[in-house]
């Protein structure tokens, strides 16, 4: 029987195991992980921060038998010749296929005395890497505490936003001139910054930190920001130590091919430790897609219908409407075959930049346009063309129920019973002078009842005009006759 | 001559609007009554229903296919003798399961009961199912699993009047059951529908998922409810089980991921949950749009999970419900015409239920057959080894209503004997070897159970026309010819009801405390309504279920762990669009009745396909042009209607039309493994214009 060993219980490898189980993987599955806790869904960390979600609810489900998961078990080495991995407890696990899902470690900010990334909260540093750390912050900090997030990439932006929703006073300090510089342009970043400010986040760009003191963070510019807790979001680094020691090819991460194989065909790498990684550390969709792809490869020996290339960054969090679709480089290209559309509406916190080729989305940055984000990301993924009216697509101009409308001088007032204004008018003149009488004469209002107002109005108008009309109607000829 | 006059109910949908009928043969008029469901309202289907009574092509005589292949009139004895003889021959040659029975959700309770009894007793076959399998079987399965009992609305319709927010997943009552809308007027509506239906037009919030992604959306809403802190943990702990397992799946469906799959903006998902959770009185309702999928039962379970997490079911003023479709869609699924079921909504596999029903029927428990197979499989088995050789159809039109209609027709043509009891010629009667003319609503006595589980009296205004007989008489006549006693198949509706009530005693849908006398006195009786011991005051019925406990042995509702995997068929280069099917305001089901009403037929004379103007431009289809819509299974012709509110990846076709306009020529016969409901709502298709030559 084939033996699959997975090092690292992360969301990507968790998904891999789920899919393998669902599809009846015939071999044994062993998962080794140094941590004591089950893996969590990183998407839920903001909910722990902002809504106080119980950390247990952020856990990913436990795998059923016969998957063997060894927690608190650090792998100390991989012997590729003998195809075994060794653990700190001196145990040896043989494999036929090995999957490395070692994830990433945070990169510590360049701050004197911060030490390594295993540091605790003692110096006011909060890594917020798992739901328990998030929950601790939620529990320990006073509701009016001041939290500073360091690093204005997507993860820093999401964290700052979630903390602000949680009611904290939040500062976001970013070294670059604008937020998320590798993903969005200046104009988009400015709108994101404005949105954060609207939600009470103090945003500092172009600032580096000099020193963390009790209760405050001193910036290189000399400005001090009061800070009860500092949350570093200064990037992550693929965890490649084991792979490196085992002699696998490493670049930034563990180098893999399209079938997620490392330089040793029996060893795969998955998730944020791999390169390419299927999206940044934050992009669970990409990692899950990779996992599903790898499940197909392990089950059938070949890659499934992996869509690939679907690079999509979608900021998570209520009110944080930001999506980066495709390669941002394409937004600035000069190719004649590429059509560009830009909307910049900073006052309403809306921004869109689109690059299209033959009506298909190549790349897009969208801020503050929730409908357009939903629509364009689907068009991007399905390869369907973007409607010719680009502005309507982006701004969501209202569509009428019946575009090919039957505009008529005699509108149907009661759709349920197909009763027109003229039919109602005729019934009125035949003596049906109120709504119930009109209803029994024409059936109008007896269906869903939504036309009652319109029928009452018509009835009133007819009553007014006939009471006004009848006397003048009779008077005028008399007067004329008299004249 | 004094005019006849009766109080009865509309023949069509599950609202069963109260009506008064006046007149005589050929001149019947209808007016709505002040029944709580419709309170004086009636839609145009209901207003024009009397016209169907006098249809020019009404079936008046039994018909038999002659040696030239023509259907010719015969008399009842000849027809029934022939049918009975053939059934006996086929059963003795191939075994009792060679005879199948196909019922309908429009049959009265009495007919549905007699049909089930006839199949199990007179034919001894397990092969019985009904068109409700096509309709809302998914909600029934999910409701039973969650609550231990399935009643469309476990509360009176009028409770909805007080709602603050109602989430309607895949329902369009503004067109399909307009009088319901008066009960939704006070509430803010959240409508989930891929298209901007008349109901969606009224909504405060319209969520427009890509067809086939409803379950992903339901999972996303649960994810938001929990992660944003709306989860009613106290209710969940006290009244439910299984939250952890359900959450373990929903944990992976954060709103931005759901947005990618469904196309529903994350912000709109959040707004929906906030509206629902923030209301003091809130309801989650499902319709066919959520149910008719290969994962239909799971999709409904997804919405029930949401309702449970918010603490809605079993609480006065809040809840979950399903908007049952067919006139007796509720009663029709309680009395034994379902493949796996005995009267009283009992399972045919439950030894206690078998013993009780066998006792009422006066037979040995072992003589009752076991469970049969769902409707689509039943039709598929026609003429195959081990499949059915004969089929008796009562109150259904499977040639049009089954998925992959082209195939359904081929399947029925493989039968040695097709017998159809109906009051109008349909695509199915046209294929029949024997057609038996039966009575319709205003010509018969009986009971119907509406969408709120209230048992209602249907009353006869007119005598049966021509030589038409009630279905009860037809079944009795056949049973006697198959060796059963006349007394075990009574023909008087009230006598059948009394037996039905006894058979249902102790079951989930207990009617044993109900009789015609109580119903005729106007008592609003919702089941369960068990018989009280001699001398006790009669049971008042149960308008509201679950207030104290749910119907599982532990009294708790159950979350179901569900996950989304996508529809069976995905779009590709050849079939790049998704077709979804539904209903219009002027027609009912396959339209056999409503297409015969001049006013309705004129308003919607032919099949149409709604599509976005951009989709039309891309495919070269013009507004008003006849279009060819094709799937891997077949092609339908429909008139193009451009509609700027459609999703660009979606086409919509109504289900009411025959021939080349039949939407089910396109649909996928893949079945939901849990409920057997077919995937009517998602088919990968292409569209092109048809050149019409003016003559």
Image: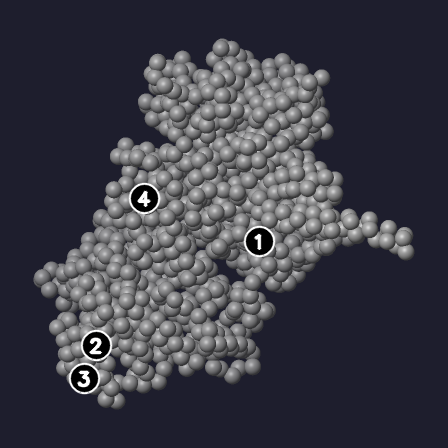
Q: Secondary structure at mark 1?
A: strand
- Residue B357: where, in percent of width, then height? 39, 19
Q: Secondary structure at mark 4?
A: loop
Q: CA distance from mark 4 to mark 1?
A: 34 Å
- Please name the residue that numbered disc 2 is placed on: A227
- Residue B220: where, in percent of width, then height? 38, 55
Q: Which mark is residue A211?
A: 3
* Mark 4 chain: B
Q: Secondary structure at mark 2?
A: loop
Are the residues under badges 3 and 4 in a single subunit? no
Camera-side mark, 2 or 4 = 2
Q: CA distance from mark 3 to mark 1?
A: 61 Å
Are the residues under badges 3 and 1 in a single subunit? no
Q: Which mark is residue B559?
A: 4
B606 on left or right of B383: right
Classed neighbour count for the residue bearing mark 3: other residues with Cα under 10 Å, few (<14), some (14–19), many (≥20): some
Nearest to N terminus: mark 3 or mark 2 = 3
* Mark 2 chain: A
- Relative to A428, residue B475 above or below: above
Camera-side mark, 3 or 1 = 3
Q: CA distance from mark 3 to mark 4?
A: 51 Å
Nearest to N terminus: mark 4 or mark 1 = 4
Are the residues under badges 3 and 2 in a single subunit? yes
Camera-side mark, 3 or 2 = 2
- Please name the residue that numbered disc 1 is placed on: B651
Q: Is residue B545 visible?
A: yes
- Residue B363: where, in percent of width, then height? 40, 14
Q: CA distance from mark 2 to mark 4?
A: 44 Å
Q: Residue at x 51, y 10 (%)?
A: B486
Q: Residue at x 31, y 77 (%)?
A: A202
């Amino acid at each position: 029987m084939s033996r699959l060993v997975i090092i690292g219980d992360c969301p990507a490898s968790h998904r891999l195991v789920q899919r393998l189980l669902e599809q009846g993987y015939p071999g044994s599955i062993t998962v080794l992980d140094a941590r004591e806790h089950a893996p969590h869904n990183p998407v839920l960390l903001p909910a722990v921060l902002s809504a106080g979600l119980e950390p247990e609810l952020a856990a990913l489900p436990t795998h059923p038998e016969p998957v063997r998961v060894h927690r608190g078990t650090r792998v100390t080495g991989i012997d590729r010749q003998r195809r075994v991995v060794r653990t700190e407890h001196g145990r040896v696990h043989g494999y036929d296929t090995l999957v490395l899902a070692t994830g990433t470690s945070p990169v510590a900010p360049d701050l004197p005395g911060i030490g390594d990334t295993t540091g605790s909260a003692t110096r006011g540093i909060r890594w917020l890497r798992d739901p328990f750390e998030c929950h601790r912050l939620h529990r320990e900090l006073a509701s009016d505490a001041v939290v500073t997030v360091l690093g204005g990439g997507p993860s820093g932006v999401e964290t700052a936003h979630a903390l602000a929703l949680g009611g904290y006073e939040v500062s976001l300090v970013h070294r670059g001139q604008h937020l998320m510089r590798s993903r969005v342009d200046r104009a988009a970043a400015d709108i994101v910054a404005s949105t954060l400010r609207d939600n009470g986040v103090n945003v500092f760009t172009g600032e580096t930190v000099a020193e963390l003191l009790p209760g405050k963070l001193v910036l290189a510019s000399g400005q001090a920001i009061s800070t009860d807790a500092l949350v570093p979001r200064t990037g992550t680094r693929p965890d490649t130590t084991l792979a490196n020691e085992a002699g696998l090819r490493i670049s930034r991460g563990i180098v893999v091919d399209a079938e997620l194989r490392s330089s040793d065909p029996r060893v795969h790498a998955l998730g944020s430790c791999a390169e390419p990684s299927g999206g940044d550390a934050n992009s669970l969709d990409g990692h899950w897609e990779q996992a599903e792809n790898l499940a197909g490869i392990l089950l059938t020996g070949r890659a499934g219908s992996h869509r690939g290339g679907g690079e999509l960054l979608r900021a998570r969090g209520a009110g944080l409407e930001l999506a980066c679709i495709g390669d941002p480089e394409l937004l600035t290209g000069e190719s004649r075959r590429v059509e560009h559309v830009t909307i910049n509406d900073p006052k309403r916190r809306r921004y869109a930049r689109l690059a299209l080729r033959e009506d298909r989305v190549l790349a897009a940055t969208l801020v503050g346009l929730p409908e357009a984000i939903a629509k364009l990301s689907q068009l991007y993924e399905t390869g369907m063309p973007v409607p010719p009216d680009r502005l309507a697509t982006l701004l969501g101009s209202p569509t009428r129920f019946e575009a090919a409308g039957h505009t008529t001088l005699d509108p149907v007032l009661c759709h349920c019973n197909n009763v027109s204004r003229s039919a109602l008018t005729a019934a009125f003149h035949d003596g049906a002078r109120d709504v119930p009488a009109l209803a029994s004469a024409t059936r109008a209002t007896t269906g869903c009842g939504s036309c009652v107002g319109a029928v009452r109005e018509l009835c009133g108008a007819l009553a007014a005009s006939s009471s006004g009309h009848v006397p003048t109607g009779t008077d005028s000829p008399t007067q004329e006759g008299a004249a | 001559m004094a005019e006849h006059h009766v109080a009865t109910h509309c023949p069509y949908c599950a609202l069963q609007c109260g009506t008064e009928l006046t007149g005589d043969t050929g001149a019947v008029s209808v007016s709505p009554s002040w029944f709580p469901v419709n309170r004086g309202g009636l839609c145009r289907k209901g207003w024009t229903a009397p016209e169907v009574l006098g249809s020019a092509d009404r079936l008046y005589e039994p018909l038999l296919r002659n040696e030239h292949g023509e259907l010719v009139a015969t008399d009842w004895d000849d027809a029934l003798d022939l049918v009975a003889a053939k059934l006996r021959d086929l059963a003795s040659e191939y075994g009792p399961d060679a005879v199948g029975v196909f019922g309908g959700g429009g049959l009265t309770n009495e007919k549905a009961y007699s049909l089930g009894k006839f199949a199990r007793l007179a034919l001894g076959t397990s092969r019985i199912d009904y068109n409700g399998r096509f309709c809302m079987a998914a909600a029934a399965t999910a409701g039973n699993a969650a609550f231990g009992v399935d009643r469309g609305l476990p509360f009176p319709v009028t409770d909805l009047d007080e709602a603050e927010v109602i989430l309607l997943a895949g329902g369009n009552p503004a067109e399909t059951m307009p009088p319901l809308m008066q009960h939704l007027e006070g509430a803010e509506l959240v409508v989930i529908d891929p298209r901007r239906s008349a109901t969606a037009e009224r909504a405060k919030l319209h969520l427009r998922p890509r067809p086939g992604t409803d379950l992903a959306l339901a999972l996303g809403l649960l994810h938001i409810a929990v992660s944003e802190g709306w989860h009613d943990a106290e209710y969940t702990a006290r009244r439910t089980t299984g939250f952890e397992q359900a959450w373990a799946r929903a944990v992976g469906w954060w709103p931005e991921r759901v947005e990618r799959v469904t196309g529903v903006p994350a912000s709109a998902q959040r707004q929906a949950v906030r509206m629902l959770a923030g209301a003091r009185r809130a309801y989650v309702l499902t319709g066919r749009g959520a149910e008719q999928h290969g994962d239909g039962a799971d999709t409904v379970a997804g919405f029930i999970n949401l309702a449970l997490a918010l603490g809605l079911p079993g609480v006065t003023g809040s809840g979950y419900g399903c908007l049952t479709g067919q006139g007796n869609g509720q009663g029709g699924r309680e009395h034994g015409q379902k493949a796996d079921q005995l009267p009283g909504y009992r399972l045919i596999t439950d030894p206690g239920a078998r013993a009780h029903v066998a006792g009422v029927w006066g037979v040995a428990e072992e003589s009752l057959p076991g469970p049969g197979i769902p409707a689509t499989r039943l039709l598929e088995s026609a003429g195959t080894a081990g499949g059915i050789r004969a089929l008796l159809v009562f109150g259904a039109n499977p040639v049009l209503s089954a998925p992959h209609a082209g195939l359904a027709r081929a399947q029925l043509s493989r039968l040695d004997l097709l017998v159809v009891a109906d009051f109008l010629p349909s695509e199915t009667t046209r294929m029949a070897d024997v057609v038996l003319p039966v009575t319709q609503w205003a010509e018969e006595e009986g009971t119907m159970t509406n969408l709120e589980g209230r048992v209602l009296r249907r009353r006869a205004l007119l005598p049966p026309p021509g030589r038409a007989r009630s279905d009860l008489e037809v079944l009795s006549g056949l049973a006697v010819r198959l060796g059963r006693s006349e007394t075990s198949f009574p023909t008087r509706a009230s006598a059948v009801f009394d037996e039905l009530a006894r058979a249902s005693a102790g079951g989930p849908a207990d009617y044993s405390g109900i009789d015609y006398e109580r119903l005729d006195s106007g008592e609003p009786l919702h089941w369960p309504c068990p018989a009280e011991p001699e001398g006790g005051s009669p049971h008042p019925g149960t308008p509201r279920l679950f207030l104290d406990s749910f119907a599982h042995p532990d009294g708790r509702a159950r979350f179901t762990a569900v996950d989304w995997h996508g529809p069976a068929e995905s779009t590709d280069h050849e079939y790049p669009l998704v077709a979804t099917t539904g209903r219009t305001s002027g027609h009912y089901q396959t339209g056999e009745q409503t297409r015969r009403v001049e006013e309705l037929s004129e308003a919607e004379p032919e099949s149409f396909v709604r599509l976005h103007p951009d989709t039309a431009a891309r495919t070269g289809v013009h507004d008003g042009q006849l279009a060819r819509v094709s799937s891997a299974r077949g092609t339908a012709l429909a008139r193009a209607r451009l509609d700027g509110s459609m999703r660009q990846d979606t086409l919509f076709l109504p289900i009411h039309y025959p021939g080349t306009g039949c939407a089910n020529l396109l649909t996928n016969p893949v079945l939901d493994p849990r409920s057997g409901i077919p995937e009517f709502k998602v088919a990968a298709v292409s569209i092109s214009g048809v050149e019409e030559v003016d003559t």
